[in-house]
Amino acid sequence: MADEALFLLLHNEMVSGVYKSAEQGEVENGRCITKLENMGFRVGQGLIERFTKDTARFKDELDIMKFICKDFWTTVFKKQIDNLRTNHQGIYVLQDNKFRLLTQMSAGKQYLEHASKYLAFTCGLIRGGLSNLGIKSIVTAEVSSMPACKFQGQKG
């Protein structure tokens, strides 16, 4: 439980620090989001390397996505993804109905405009993990009502 609280605090400070140190133009041009996403990418690469060192090779993309939704997500966020969908053409949607990094914020639409900065690191985390498993992808996040969110991964 303590490690979860530390992760949440570290994540919040990371987001806050990136935005505080940025100049006005960087915030407007999305450089802060990119910086957070790149941090997540590197962390995702390292975590996947560590988590998969003793596992058998994956059969296909769907197997990899199931690993991300179950094992990877459980290790990082202490719960599995609530829903995984695919069109079987390289697009996967991962839905978390109570995403831990958003539960500290209001459950309404009050802080919806700020959600993207708290999701950028996780988009990078997923993209980095997939990259180390051989899938180049573009990962985006969508929030319609907090704390639920959807991450869409598309082969790229």
Image (cartoon, rainbow, N blue to C red):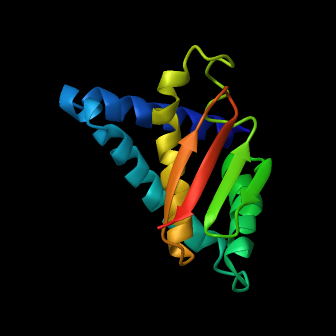
Residue 61: quadrant of the picture: bottom right
Q: Position of residue 131 (x, y in %)?
A: 50, 71
Residue extending farthest to the top is 110
Camera-side residue of 112 and 76: 112
Above/below status of 109 relative to 36: above
Q: Is residue 153 left or right of residue 38?
A: right
Q: Residue at x 31, y 38 (%)?
A: 30
The residue under the point 59% across, 35% down is: 8
Above or below residue 115? Residue 124 is below
Between 56 and 2, the residue placed more toward the observer is: 56
Q: Residue at x 58, y 39 (%)?
A: 142
Q: Left or right: 6 with respect to 84?
A: left
| Residue 45 visible at all | yes
Indicate the position of residue 123 as horizontal and vertical percent values: 52, 50
Where residue 136 appears, x then y in whole percent?
A: 48, 71
Q: Is residue 20 left or right of residue 144?
A: left
Residue 80 in sight from this viewpoint: no
Q: Position of residue 88 (x, y in %)?
A: 70, 69
What is the total number of numbered labels drawn onto the structure image? 0
* Quadrant where the N terminus is found in the figure: top right
Q: Write the residue at 74% across / 35% down.
A: 98
